Amino acid sequence: MLPRGIRNNNPLNIRRSKDQWKGLAEAQTDRAFVQFKTLEYGWRAAFYLLTRTYYHKYRLYTIRTIIRRWAPSNENDTNAYIANVSKLTGIDPDEPIGIPSESPTRWIALGAAMAIQENGSNSLDYFAMLRGWEMCRG
């Protein structure tokens, strides 16, 4: 069986909120997490949150500050999440990731590593991820 985030086309497990994301599935049957029509829309939302909301609005520039907000310790082993994402990306937890428009590969790597943390590595569609990045940036 596929992990919940992949079944929901929501690779970073974005929680339900008042946000009306593009590409929402008509039926929202998961009580906790948003469901998207396609994986591309789920990736679009994830990259929007990471690059526009977390980077530009909240001014979170490192893996440590992003993950502390994304995966708080009351729900996750936040330190293990940070360590794993840092190891997978090769980016130190306290090193600035860079401006999204100037360092897209670092932000895409961050998204991929977070999706691996959330869902495991066997179920990711990297082509959908890249299409989601393009949808977010356009």
Image (cartoon, rainbow, N blue to C red):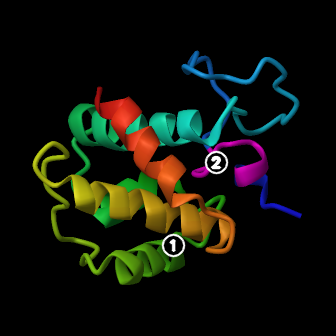
Where does the image place residue 79, in percent across and percent down from the top left?
A: 48, 76
Where does the image place residue 59, in percent across and percent down from the top left?
A: 21, 42
Decide: is 36 above or below 114. Answer: above
Taking depth in this image into account, of 123 and 64 the one nearest to the observer is 123
Extent of the magenta region? 6-13
Q: Quadrant of residue 85?
A: bottom left
Does the stretch in magenta take in 136? no
Q: Amino acid at mark 1?
A: Tyr
The mark lying in front, picked from 2 and 1, is 2
**Numbered tag placed on residue 108 in the rendering:** none
Residue 91 placement, left or right of 98 = right
Q: Amino acid at mark 2?
A: Asn
Taking the spot 82% from the left edge, 61% from the top edge, the residue there is 2
Taking the spot 10% from the left edge, 49% from the top edge, the residue there is 102
Residue bearing mark 2: 13
Residue bearing mark 1: 81
Taking the spot 41% from the left edge, 79% from the top edge, the residue there is 88
Which quarter shows the N terminus? bottom right
